[in-house]
Amino acid sequence: MLRKGLTLTAAVFMAGLLFISSAQAAVNFQKYDDALSEAGKQDKHVMIYFWADWCRYCSMFNEEVLPNDNVVKSLNDSFLSVQVNVDEDPDLAKKYNARTLPMIVFLDAKGEIAGYLPGYLPPTEFLEILNFVKNKSYQNN
């Protein structure tokens, strides 16, 4: 009976750990200037996500794409990510011509524009874009 109780306790504990670890998985967003300065040092691309509170597709992106475990892993492992509310930072939005929302701008490690991704994509398709950028496949086109 004691063994059965310990097994059940261990199972509940492990399930709790899995829940906590998955609930804590999130994209590590940083400030724009910090990401640009770190990009060269870490030889990583910068992913700038332009959004607004009133944007329906931005809400979908926030709810469906950004929490996706594979998206989180890819962004945190291979990119420096920046999140910009266009209403709070219109100058940065203007600098990158972010008129259609959501808008993703990818920069290379030198801060040069590697590509634009206007509009919403579901997680699987967004991951394909992340791999395309991460592997620098845009340089072959």
Image (cartoon, rainbow, N blue to C red):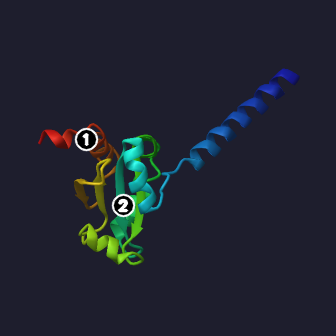
In front here: 99 or 39?
A: 39
The residue labelled by disc 2 is 49
Q: Position of residue 6 (x, y in %)?
A: 82, 27
Compared to 75, does 54 lie above or below?
A: below
Q: Position of residue 129 (x, y in %)?
A: 27, 45
Q: How many marks?
A: 2
Residue at x 45%, y 57% (from the top left corner): 34
Neighbours of disc 1 within 10 Å: few (<14), some (14-19), many (20+): few
The picture quadrant where one finds residue 16 is: top right
As drawn, is 64 to the left or to the right of 25? left
Is residue 1 something one can see in this rendering?
no
The residue labelled by disc 1 is 132
**Circle 1: residue type:** Phe
Is residue 29 something one can see in this rendering?
yes
Say which mark, if any, is on residue 80. none
Q: Which is more N-terminal, label 1 or label 2?
A: 2
In front here: 141 or 23?
A: 141
Question: Which quadrant would the N terminus be assigned to in this image?
Answer: top right
The picture quadrant where one finds residue 15 is: top right
Neighbours of disc 2 within 10 Å: few (<14), some (14-19), many (20+): many
